[in-house]
Amino acid sequence: MDHQPIPNPEQAPQESQAPKQPQKEPQESSASAWFDALEMFAWALVVVFLVFTFAVRLCRVDGSSMENTLQNGELLLLSGINYTPAQDDIVVFHLTDREHDLEKTLVKRVIATGGQLVEINFTERTICVDGVPYADEHSVLKNQFDSIVNQYLYFRPDWEYDRTSDSMTVLVPDGHLFVLGDNRNFSRDSRDQYIGFVDERCVLGKVLFRLSPFTLF
């Protein structure tokens, strides 16, 4: 009687296993991720557009009329939402005067608002609003060589100007502003009859801060 060897479990042949193949992510998942990213980017653009259209604006200073407070080429951020102009604010407004071919955006300082009486004495270099001296601490009087002088050299107005007293007296209409540039001798502003009183509806907003160098106002 033949005896067959009993197989040893330890020597049992092991089943061969095929190496696992790396799983590939479905193309649908990748396309969905790209679509989500594009959608978020589009919404971000919409938000930025709405903010810079209705909430804040960027404006660049053009010229030297607001020296030494603002310099030519500086970038400003302004806001006009629920804004009511007040004395000493720096505002940006759009000027349109087709009769004298004036159409541009200007930045000036509010000296007085509607209903207030403005008196400027060019000899004494003083400004009074409703009889109260205006603290004109931001203004400078320069000549064409940018050196500081002690008198108004230019822009004595032709309207509401008394040559005897070398002064100007105006009553600001309701809904309007009387504005001046801080660089008094080199600023076309409310002293100039071609600009005169600024309609509040033309004000784009109040300057909040300067971007570079960063300065709050």
Image (tube, grey):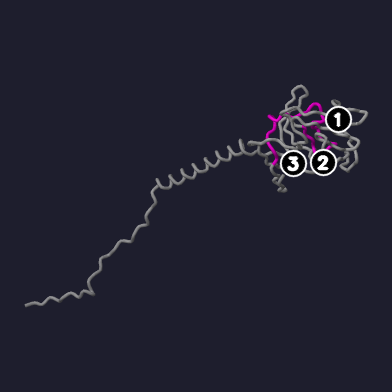
Q: CA distance from mark 2 to mark 3?
A: 24 Å
How packed mark 2 is, by other alpha carbons closer than 10 Å (few <14, some 14-19, many 20 or more), is some
What residue appears at the point 71 percent right and 46 percent down from the top-left corner? 216
| Magenta stretch bounds | 178-207
What residue appears at the point 86 percent right and 26 percent down from the top-left corner? 158
Q: Are marks 3 and 1 in contact (CB under 8 Å)?
A: no
Q: Which part of the image, by quadrant, shows the N terminus? A: bottom left
Give x and y (percent) for residue 47: 56, 40
How packed mark 3 is, by other alpha carbons closer than 10 Å (few <14, some 14-19, many 20 or more), is few
Q: CA distance from mark 2 to mark 1?
A: 16 Å
Residue toward you, 31 or 16: 31
Label 2 sits on a secondary structure element that is loop
Decide whether residue 203 is among the magenta residues.
Answer: yes
Decide whether residue 8 is among the magenta residues.
Answer: no
**Residue marked by disc 2:** 136
Give x and y (percent) for residue 176: 73, 29
Q: Amino acid under label 1? A: Met
Q: Nearer the viewer, mark 2 or mark 3?
A: 2
Residue 36 lies left or right of residue 183; in this view the side is: left
Quarter holding residue 192: top right
Q: Which mark is residue 73?
A: 3
Q: Amino acid under label 2? A: Asp
Give x and y (percent) for residue 44: 54, 42
Label 3 sits on a secondary structure element that is loop
How packed mark 1 is, by other alpha carbons closer than 10 Å (few <14, some 14-19, many 20 or more), is many
**Residue marked by disc 1:** 168
Q: How many marks?
A: 3
Residue 193 lies left or right of residue 211; in this view the side is: right
Q: Are marks 2 and 1 in contact (CB under 8 Å)?
A: no
